[in-house]
Image (spheres, rainbow, N blue to C red):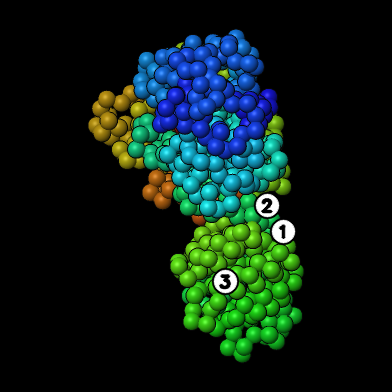
Amino acid sequence: MSLEFLLAPRSVAVIGAGREPGGVGRSVFDALIDGGFPGHVWPVNPAADEIAGRPAFHDVASLPGTPDLAVIAVPATRVPAVMEECGAAGVLGVVVVSAGFKETGPAGGALEREIASIARAHGIRMLGPNCLGLMVPSQHLNASFAGTMVPSGSIAVVTQSGALGTAILDWARGRGGLAGFVSLGNRADLSEADFLRAFAERGGTRVIAGYLESVVDGEAFLRTAREVTRTVPVVLLKAGVSEAGARAVSSHTGSLAGSDAAYEAAFEAAGVLRARDAEQLFGISEAFAAQPLPAGRGVAILTNAGGPAVMATDACERLGVSLAALEPTTIEALRAVLPPAAAPYNPVDILGDAPPERYAQALRILAGDPGVHSLLVLLTPQEQTCPDEAASAIAAVASECGRTTLAVLMGEDTVEPARRSLAAAGIPAYRYPENAVDALSAMERYAELRVRPATVAPTVQADRETVRRVLDEARAAGRAFVLDEHAAEIAAAYGIPQAAGAVARDRAEALRIADDIGYPVALKVASPDILHKTDIGGVALGITDAAALGVAWDRVLDSAHRRMPDAAIWGALVQRMVPPGFEVIIGVERDATFGPLIMFGLGGVYVEVLRDVAFRLAPLDTAEAMRMIRGTRAYGLLRGARGAKPSDVDAIADVLVRVAALASDFPEIVELDINPLVVAQRGCGAIAADIRIGIGG
């Protein structure tokens, strides 16, 4: 459903506009008038006949027409009645700026649910409550109490924080303006997903920037963001990354995940770019708003000082931005126009005495190199530097060459006028090299993300009936975890390779199992209460015969009873020893917002120490699974470090796809760990040595 009745209304009623300046309702009314809104603006106040020289109306029913948009600024307890008035009049959209709802406690929450119910019953779309309102400069619409109108620009902003929203508006007033601004408030109806789509569909939006603390509907957010980012970049600052308030979890995956990992994975899946702080949010958004996307990777750095070039190069290395390898003809052309002491290689140092003409000549030559897809221009205010004239020269060449161009003018008072003139010419000018490289990195990643094929999870052949039976039996027995032998059944049903074995209830059964599967074997205590078996002496490895197995049985079970006296001990898993290989972990943690979160990383006892892990949302296809593996430091070891033979990375990707399918198919699986998955040499597969599955719901 289009939200144009909110973003481009023909008429607005301000319900609660006061007779005297200063109140919230009166501030909204004044903002609409002062912003030059061309349509009707009707103040509604039961105690006033006129406000600021304009006729006032006692209620919605007495208005001379039906407003497209109503801004409600009355005490919270009066909002339900006003919502009913709006519904009866046929109002399509409302902005409830009034506070006093769920942010105040249970009573306010009940009031919020009531107004949301009224909105649904009348087909009203509602922004808020407890929000600043909205602003669309191209429509001269300032339906907010967030201050004066900002200029019209190409950045649309969606924010959950009103305070940060006012800071963004203040920034925008001096940095080119906005395409639109929405303060979401409590999101009783309209959410971030609705406005991502609405702004993407409006002409003139080149980038959507946002501040989020949470997402209302994870599925809707992912679906919408995936569609939007195919055409418009979305840059979000997600706050609330601390895990201090996370629930206690018993699995490796759960202890490593936390809500922030889920958001990171969700943004990756949806093609959303994440800003780590407000400065990065502004800097990246400004680059998208002003410059074309780079046609490929390869940046040329032009500088009048060595130190900033080193800083920029370090930032490029850290963020994966490649320096272009200049063609020999480019280097020769640079030598022909630069002083002998200049450096014609990338970074190109044109020396501290560089006049504007030298900047222009060098930039034109660099822009003509086929391997240069973006330009990063650095300037420090040295004695012979003319920042204003250099800025004019940079802007002139950038407008001719069509390359993505970002500038860094280090300093403050001396270079600020030049920085502003570059920004006015559509060239973002940053204070430090790292800020510019952050923005360029985001642009390069987005250019690749938008053309990356959408994830299409393959159909995994599986015995789903067996899994359903095992899970139903475990839930009926009131278990929080699936028994080890049943976890093996589930893994087998999804084609996840594992070591042969079974749970023995006593020593005699353990000896029979070992004879069947063959020595050497491992023995692991079987208990729903013991996660870290090694820590309590609950594991024996490399058992080569029956006598050694008998001794190990007594030692493992005695240690488990002594170290964990309250744990339920079901016996021990007798398992064929897995041949040596590289140990990794694969896991699942079900996030409340986004669903199953898949983890991959270095396995064994190192996973929680080194925390070298990557997360993605299920389902996965093979390509996404491979990107996940490559995103860890462990990938360098898997490829074969220091002469070691490469491991079977394809087998890991296959297991990741199968685990993701299992988690997607069965929502009651809330956590899963395969730790370790022992990976053999390339072409020789991988085997799950230990599988733990937790269930709920």
Q: Which residue is mark 2?
A: 447
CA gap between label 3 and label 2 equals 32 Å
Of marks 3 and 2, which one's residue comes earlier in the chain?
Answer: 3
x and y percent of residue 9 in the render? Answer: 65, 28
Image quarter of residue 197: top right
CA gap between label 1 and label 2 equals 8 Å
x and y percent of residue 254 in the render? Answer: 43, 35
Disc 2 marks which amino acid?
Ala
Q: Secondary structure at mark 3?
A: helix
Disc 1 marks which amino acid?
Ala
Confirm whether residue 557 shows in the render: yes
Q: Are marks 1 and 2 in contact (CB under 8 Å)?
A: yes
Q: Secondary structure at mark 1?
A: loop
Residue at x 65%, y 72% (from the top left corner): 393
Residue 295 bears which disc, if any?
A: 1
Quadrant location, the N terminus: top right
